[in-house]
Image (cartoon, rainbow, N blue to C red):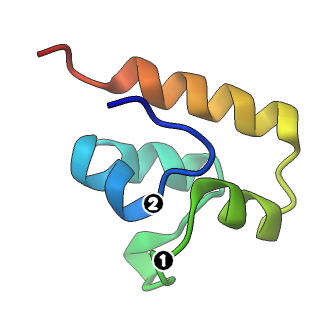
Amino acid sequence: MRITSDTYIEEIINIIPDSILYLQKKGIKCIACGEAVWGTLKDTADLKKITAQELSVIVSELNGMIEPK
């Protein structure tokens, strides 16, 4: 699977469990504090005022975290 900006946060976490901390560091989701997990990566990035360029880097880095099968 390849992650895009339209991938739902829940899917990302299921594919890459270690992405929770990464996403928190990037300001995408505060899963530990109970912020809702629903929505796409882009939806959440828009809410957090993350630029398209920053989102592109996040998507690329998340794809780099996927374990090869």
Between the residue at mark 1 and the residue at mark 2, the CA separation in whole angstroms equals 7 Å
Q: Please give the residue where the numbered disc 1 appears in the rendered image.
A: 38
Left/right placement of residue 32 relative to residue 50 reads left
Q: Which residue is pictured at 37% across the width and 44% down the height?
A: 19
In the picture shown, does residue 58 fall above or below 69?
below
Q: Residue at x 23, y 53 (%)?
A: 14
Is residue 47 visible from the viewing direction of this image? yes
Give residue 39's quadrant in the image: bottom right
Q: Nearer the viewer, residue 37 or 3?
A: 3
Residue 62 placement (x, y as % from top left): 47, 31
SS at mark 1 in the image: loop
Asked if the residue at tag 2 contacts the one at tag 1, i.e. Cβ–Cβ closer than 8 Å, the answer is yes
Amino acid carrying mark 2 in the image:
Ile
Q: Is residue 26 left or right of residue 36?
A: right
Along the polypeptide, which appears first: circle 1 or circle 2?
2
Question: Which quadrant of the structure image shows residue 41?
Answer: bottom right
From what the image shows, is residue 49 above or below residue 67? below
Residue type at tag 1: Trp
At horizontal 79% and vertical 70% (from top left) the residue drawn is: 47
Q: Which residue is mark 2?
A: 9
